[in-house]
């Protein structure tokens, strides 16, 4: 058995109802990460989320639990990112760590919406 981790990020559209859009966007991000990497909630050790300081209506961990109730027993932790001049606004980032029996050379990251610009190299989604 090995321990693997994967990162991802999603932008929360401006002008949308922030709390409901965060639930939708974080749910889509986590569903994509779990599907592409064949992650079961039973295998997850923990999930670390961060959100930019301009997202103030909902905690991203709470949004994940609302979007995907099967994460109710998964340890989640959310923190606020530091304000960095020139940083992309309205972003939620994630790091999922899990145990797997499958051989996996590299986890497949997912970056959705404007967060795609955070990934400098192309992502191979084989």
Image: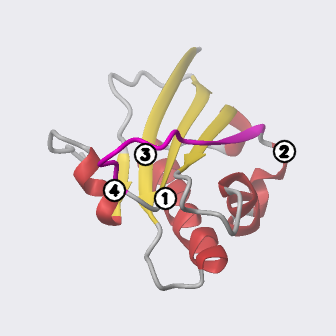
Quadrant that contains the N terminus? top right
- Would residue 86 be counted in the magenta stretch? yes
Q: Mark 2 or mark 4, which has the lower sequence index?
A: 2
Q: To which residue does mark 1 refer?
A: 29
| Residue for point 65% across, 56% down | 60
Which quadrant of the figure has residue 101?
Answer: top right
Which disc, if any, is residue 42?
Answer: none
Q: CA distance from mark 2 to mark 1?
A: 19 Å
Sequence order check: which comes first, mark 3 or mark 2?
A: 3
Q: Which circle, 3 or 4, is nearer the viewer? A: 4
For label 2, the residue is 73
Question: Which quadrant does the C terminus fall into?
Answer: top left
Q: How far apart are labels 4 and 1 at the CA level?
A: 11 Å
User: Rounded to the nearest whole Å, what is the CA distance between mark 3 and mark 4?
Assistant: 9 Å
Horizontally, is 114 left or right of 66 in the view?
left
Can you identify the residue that label 4 sits on? Answer: 115
């Amino acid at each position: 058995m090995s321990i693997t981790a994967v990162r991802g990020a999603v932008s929360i559209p401006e002008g949308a109802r922030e709390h409901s859009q965060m639930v939708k966007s974080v749910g889509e991000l986590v569903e994509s990460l779990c599907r592409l990497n064949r992650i079961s909630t039973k295998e997850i050790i923990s999930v670390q989320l961060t959100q930019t300081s301009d997202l103030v209506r909902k905690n991203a961990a709470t949004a994940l639990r609302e979007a995907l109730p099967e994460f109710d027993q998964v340890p989640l932790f959310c923190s606020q990112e530091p304000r960095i001049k020139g940083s992309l606004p309205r972003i939620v980032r994630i790091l999922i760590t899990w145990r797997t029996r499958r051989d996996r050379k590299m986890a497949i990251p997912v970056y959705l919406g404007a967060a795609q610009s955070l990934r400098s190299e192309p992502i191979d989604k084989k």
